[in-house]
Amino acid sequence: MMVEVAPAPNAQTVKISNATVFRNMVFDHLSTKQWPAQISIKGLQAKAGFAMNRDVYLQVITRNMPALGDWPFFLNSQFMNALKRALLGFVQAVNSFALSLSLDDQMKVVWPTYEVHAYYDTGRSTIIGGKRQPILSPMNSFGYYLSHDGVLFGYSHAIGSETDIGLKTLSASSLYKVRVPNEGSVRIMTGVTAEEVPKSWTGWWSSRACQLWSWACE
């Protein structure tokens, strides 16, 4: 979903620094799901003024999604909605400005949320701590609100590819990098599972990822 705002004609002179907001979030029910996603830099050449293949960094942020463990807990969609309302009521009692929280921010209070934030290499760099680092610019993010009615022991998730696109894991399950050709795109796969058996029964995460999604071990 995209929302775009602009000053009213002949009525407002305020300058809007960020006129467009994207919300690319969907609802889905687990146990185990995988979704494709397309990372595209089409149109970036005209914006940047030069052509180049670009590294795109993918940062995974999870909320209310504890890692797989040995202690069970229970989720219920109706209970999570009730808990969200209760927490928001408490927050609003303490801070009246909380009334301005968007629905997206309200969902993140208690709902299991999986987000992927993308950043592209601008082609420029800076020195940090004596090392040259690329300057990144944000792209559109995407993600999922997840539900699972029943007992579970945590969540597992991964990003991979069904084909060899040079996707690299920089930090386990949280930061990835992929090279995207100039004016082109690549297709990645994201996967999340609500684990219904304890960690001690399934082995280490790396072997579990291979069992869930073949592309996670490429």
Image: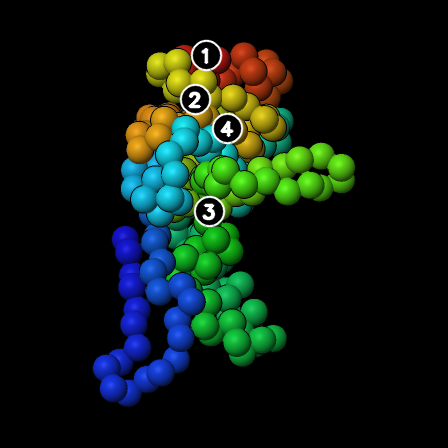
Q: Nearer the viewer, mark 2 or mark 4?
A: 4
- Left or right, 2 with respect to 169, comes to left
Residue visible at 35% across and 30% down?
A: 182
Earlier residue among tags 2 and 1: 2
Q: Residue at x 50, y 28 (%)?
A: 177
Q: Is residue 147 above or below residue 169?
A: below
Evaluate if marks 4 and 1 touch, with contact meaning CB atoms under 8 Å apart: no
User: Label 4 vs label 1: CA separation?
Assistant: 14 Å
Please give left or right for residue 157 compared with residue 163 in the image. right
Mark in front: 4 vs 1: 4
> Do callouts 2 and 1 mark residues in contact (Cβ within 8 Å)?
yes
Residue 138 has which mark? 3
Q: Which residue is mark 1?
A: 218
Front label number (2 vs 3)? 3
- What's the colour scheme? rainbow
What's the residue type where badge 4 is placed? Lys
